[in-house]
């Protein structure tokens, strides 16, 4: 009888051991006493983006959507993020995507035979890029420096914004008259700006309009609205308006459609 009871206890213990093994479904690993324990291996952790990176992406999206306004500088914690965005390839991809939208829209327009179908371009960071200047200003983390920017613009060394020269020429070939409107000072920056545009291949535009003495002190919205109003009074039909600042695309006489290029480096009110 005693032998039977011992046998039954042994069977129960074996069954309990097998049940425990089936639940753990793990691997045998030595513990710190040198014995073996059955330990379930935890699944590998999912990659978690840095919180700072998430915040900077949210900030840039809010800036481009014009939900953040009047910001004086790029947040210092976003310096590396903005740098990677501007020179790491994503900026070029975003501009290229917008150019595709512009060409798709322009291709559906039936131009008139009178030669009065027009398109408006901003200049800085729309036609020519200031990214090398802003690299020295920590991509907008440093406050705006009017004299420093003037010195940079006087050199006339801005490269073309990737893809924008091709867009410019495509619109010309379609038959649009292109007007360039810039807030650069006419008195001091006219010659280097014209030289810079020509050096980068921007020829045959209808007119380059710069801020004259009459418009000094006006906001960008008021100044550019007035210029566009003059263009329309001359009989031109503005089909499209491209700029990197919301102030390029606000106000009066905007045209039939506007297109905003990305620019997380500075804000022009």
Image: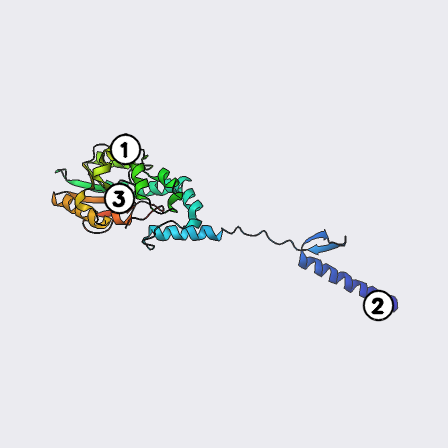
Camera sees residue 53: yes
Residue under the image location 23 percent in, 37 percent down: 188
Which label belongs to residue 242?
Answer: 3
Disc 3 or 2, which lies upstream in sequence?
A: 2
Which numbered circle lies on residue 5? 2
Q: Earlier in the sequence, mark 1 or mark 3?
A: 1
The furthest residue to the front: 147
Q: Earlier in the sequence, mark 1 or mark 2?
A: 2
Please state which of the two labelled residues, at mark 1 or mark 3, is closer to the viewer: 1
Point out residue 151 in the picture as x, y percentages from the top left corner. 31, 37
Q: What number is the disc on residue 101?
A: none
Q: Is 184 drawn above or below residue 218 in the view shown?
A: above
Left or right, residue 164 beside residue 254: right
> Element under label 1?
helix
Q: Position of residue 91 (x, y in %)?
A: 37, 42
Q: CA distance from mark 1 to mark 2?
A: 100 Å
Image quadrant where residue 191 sits: top left
Mark whose residue sits in front, 1 or 2: 1
| Residue carrying label 1 | 196
Q: Residues within 10 Å of mark 1 (few under 14, many from 20)?
A: many
In the rendered view, how is the structure colored?
Answer: rainbow
Q: Quadrant of residue 133?
A: top left
Mark toward the viewer: 3 or 2: 3
**Viewer-proximal residue, 72 or 56?**
72
Q: Quadrant of the N terminus?
A: bottom right
Residue 127 at x, y percent in the picture: 28, 38
- Secondary structure category for the residue under label 2: helix
Relative to 126, 40 lies left or right:
right
Q: Residue furthest bottom?
A: 1
Instruction: Please indicate whether residue 164 sits to the left or right of residue 60 in the image.
Output: left
Q: State how far apart marks 3 and 2 are (Cα).
A: 92 Å
Question: Can residue 110 be seen from the camera position used here?
Answer: no
């Amino acid at each position: 009888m005693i032998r039977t009871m011992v046998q039954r206890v042994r069977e129960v213990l074996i069954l309990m051991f097998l049940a425990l093994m089936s639940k753990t479904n793990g691997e045998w690993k030595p513990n710190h006493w040198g014995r073996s324990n059955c330990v379930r291996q935890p699944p590998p952790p999912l990659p978690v983006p840095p919180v700072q990176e998430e915040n900077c992406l949210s900030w840039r999206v809010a800036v481009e959507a014009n939900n953040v306004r009047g910001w004086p500088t790029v947040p210092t914690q976003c310096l590396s993020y903005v740098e990677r965005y501007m020179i790491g390839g994503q900026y070029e991809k975003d501009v290229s995507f917008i150019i595709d939208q512009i060409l798709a829209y322009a291709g559906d327009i039936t131009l008139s035979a009178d030669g009065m179908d027009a398109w408006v371009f901003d200049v800085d960071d729309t036609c020519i890029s200031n990214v090398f200047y802003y690299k020295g200003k920590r991509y907008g983390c440093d406050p705006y420096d009017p004299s420093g920017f003037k010195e940079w613009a006087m050199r006339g060394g801005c490269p073309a914004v990737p893809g924008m020269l091709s867009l410019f020429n495509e619109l010309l070939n379609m038959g649009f008259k292109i007007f360039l409107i810039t807030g650069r000072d006419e008195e001091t920056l006219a010659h280097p700006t014209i030289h810079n545009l020509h050096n980068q291949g921007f020829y045959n535009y209808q007119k380059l309009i710069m801020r004259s003495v009459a418009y000094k002190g006006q906001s960008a919205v008021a100044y550019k609205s007035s210029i566009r109003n003059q263009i329309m009074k001359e009989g031109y039909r503005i089909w499209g308006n491209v700029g990197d600042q919301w102030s390029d695309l606000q106000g009066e006489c905007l045209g039939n459609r506007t297109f905003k290029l990305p620019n997380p480096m500075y804000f022009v009110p």
